[in-house]
Image (cartoon, helix red, strand yellow):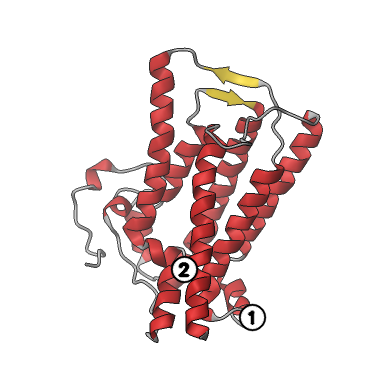
Amino acid sequence: MKRFAILIYGVVCYLVFFATFLYAIGFIGNLIVPKSIDSVPTVSIGTALFIDTCLLAVFAVQHSLMARPFFKRAWKRIVPEAAERSTYVLFSSLALILLFALWQPMGGVIWDIDNSLARNVLHASYAFGWLLVLASTFAIDHFDLFGLRQTWRFARGVEYQPPAFKQPILYRIVRHPLYVGWFFVFWSTPTMTVAHLFFAVATTVYTLIAIQLEERDLQDAHPEYRDYKRRVPMLIPAIGKLLRRSPLQVG
């Protein structure tokens, strides 16, 4: 029963993540959802700035702190190891849901592009960003990244083995294609409001800091990552590497 319960827990956490992911597309892109990043302002800009800063800080602290190895080791004393990643995914989703629910639009337009071709290009860039984010997760191990692989193996009584370091095609041209996708998502908008600009700047700065923490952990976990880091650019894709097979690639 414990194995089955943890599997169900992992599936529920994944479904919460997936619903949050879909809502985020509408929230940032002002599409369909009842409340988006540029809904009608209801408070003063100072109050909105304070609330939105707190919401982003909550997400940043949760997302980074729970991902650190020292926190994982302590957390596993409370949460079953097989459910640790699913719990991280759940808490990250809840932090985003809190942001979506309490976000305060600010009004004000920084730029508004009228040219229909330029607007279509930016809309396409926004869609491309989300597709790149999703493709990047599948390029490594989507279901391991979001905890399902761990809970599934536990339910079957199979010992979990962390994925080996590998370099699939997207990761042969840039070390962090997932974050490149996020940058497209954050900045690709034909109408940039004050709230959207604040969100884009804050999340970009956070991402750049998070990359440094993540790469430090990766170097500790995978000695070969140092050579990989030397050869492959962090965020600016090296297209010439696309067709080259790396000696580090597995499978």
To which residue does mark 1 refer?
78
In the rendered image, is residue 67 in sight? no
Q: Position of residue 110 (x, y in %)?
A: 61, 21
x then y, percent, for residue 126: 44, 34
Residue 145 against residue 173 in the figure, above or below: below
Whether residue 48 is visible, yes or no, is yes
Dot 1 amino acid type: Ile
Q: Which numbered dot is residue 93? A: none
Q: Residue at x 60, y 66 (%)?
A: 66
Residue 250 falls in which quadrant of the image? Answer: bottom left
- Label annotation for residue 147: 2
Question: Mark 1: few, some, or many residues within 10 Å (few <14, many ≥20)?
Answer: few
Residue 234 left/right relative to 56: left
Q: Residues within 10 Å of mark 2 (few under 14, many from 20)?
A: many
Q: Name the residue rendered at 35%, 60% in the picture.
A: 140
Nearer to us in this view, 29 or 136:
29
Tell me the quadrant of the picture where the C terminus can be found. Answer: bottom left
Residue sitting at x 54%, y 48%:
207
How many discs appear?
2
Label 2 sits on a secondary structure element that is loop
Q: Position of residue 183 (x, y in %)?
A: 48, 40
Mark 2 → mark 1, Cα distance in angstroms:
17 Å
Q: Is residue 105 left or right of residue 185?
A: right
Q: Position of residue 33 (x, y in %)?
A: 57, 37
> Is the residue 194 above or below the residue 59 in the image?
above
Marks 1 and 2: in contact by CB < 8 Å? no
Which quadrant would residue 145 be assigned to in this image?
A: bottom left
- Identity, as a three-letter code, of the amino acid under mark 2: Gly
Q: Secondary structure at mark 1?
A: loop
N-term mark: 2 or 1? 1
